[in-house]
Amino acid sequence: MSDLISVLHIPDDIGYWLVRADGGKYYEDFLLNNFIAVSDNEVTLESLINSGDSSIAGITIDHYKTLYKDIYKDWTAQQISHGTSRTFKFIQEMKIGDIVMVPSKKSTSFIIGIIKSNPYEISKEEIESKVEVNYAVNPFFKRRNIEWIKEVSRNEISEKLYWILSAHQTIFDLKEEKEYINQLLSPIYVQEGLCHGTLKISKEEGLNSNEWYDLYSIIKKQSNKSGHELIVRSNVQSPGLIELLSSDWVAVVTTVSILSGIVVGDVDFFGIKFKGIVPSIQAYKKGQMEIKKTEKEIEIMEEEKITKQLENERLRRELENEETKKEAELVRERLKITDFDAGKLISSVEKQMGNDDVRDAEQP
């Protein structure tokens, strides 16, 4: 658990994809060289892009099937269907900004990244120019550049994603499972107008009724303070995850913070940066209000009265917050609650270290 987290704002219209690296064979090549690729080199990118030139409807998967049938004459109908499906998704359906997840060998770990380029094609000579490496070099020509964000272990992904471990498609859409992928990216994120915060309960022997009551009491208090409902999704098993959802991001951020003991750093919310949590929700709301008065209405005595009222309100809320913090600290210790900060961030330094063993074939 880190002592500083950020709130991640995830665009509403992005896609989510799982791309296999030939059973994990090319996992390291993808990771170290920041790309993903699709097979069937005989079907060129140019031919795919031009396949729908004479069609009013534009490029469709049927155009791809026609190309595949012409090139791979000995393939079965099922092979043609699988080939066109993965290539069509890679070229036509994926887009810049989409999130990609790639499993390693035996799916013991996964890398997660963002698509940074349109599809492009490299030559056989470019692939063969670097041959002396300590990992398998991917031979596929059609590629997209990726900015890798995190690497997570298998035991950190939700059970709701376990089905992908046995699925055999090379590329498939994970849009329906996006919430389980988002929570791997950040303990707190905002998407489609909802803020999500995920907590991890590590108490091995399970929670009794009193512990559940204490936990939900704190969540309820935070909900009441914000004036917005906090929805709770929980994995009834322990250890397990609890997810908090609300249209009020402040309610989620403060609740995750008070229960996990973390400090929230830069908050990137709809393009606005906030440094840390606002000291008081009430003060934040008051700061958004503009009170227009004429100069005659602003008297020194009135200003002092308002200042005193605000100070009393601040002290009252600080006292309430301190009491809630003490309660939360006891619950946190008993239930072993932390923020769910999955995996590790992938840095360019780590990738450079991994590439130290790469040497140009032409060099002596």
Image (tube, rainbow, N blue to C red):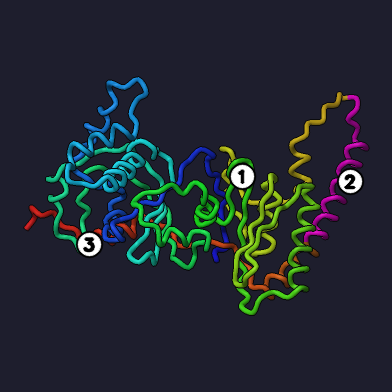
| Helix, strand or loop status at disc 3 | loop
Is residue 178 in sight in this rendering?
A: yes
Residue at 35% x, 35% y is 92
Q: Quadrant of residue 335?
A: bottom right
Q: Quadrant of residue 356?
A: bottom left
Residue depth check, mark 2 versus mark 3: number of the one nearer the observer: 3
Question: In this picture, is 72 found above or below 360?
Answer: above
Binning the other alpha carbons within 10 Å of mark 2 as few (below 14), some (14 to 19) or many (20 upward) gives few
Q: For the N terminus, give its image quadrant.
A: bottom right
Q: CA distance from mark 1 to mark 3?
A: 43 Å
Q: Is residue 83 left or right of residue 97?
A: left
Give the label on residue 274, or none. Answer: 1
Residue at 57% x, 59% y is 4
Q: For the C terminus, give its image quadrant.
A: bottom left
Q: Which residues are magenta?
A: 296-321
- Identified by mark 2, the residue type is Gln
Residue 285 lies, in percent from the top left, at: 76, 41
- Residue highlighted by disc 2: 309
Q: Is residue 291 left or right of residue 335?
A: right
Q: Is residue 57 left or right of residue 246?
A: left
- Residue highlighted by disc 3: 135
Q: CA distance from mark 2 to mark 3?
A: 67 Å
Residue at 27% x, 57% y is 26
Q: Tell me, yes or no, whether the highlighted magenta stretch contains residue 307.
A: yes
Question: In this picture, is 209 found above or below 182?
Answer: below
Binning the other alpha carbons within 10 Å of mark 3 as few (below 14), some (14 to 19) or many (20 upward) gives some
Residue 241 lies, in percent from the top left, at: 60, 64
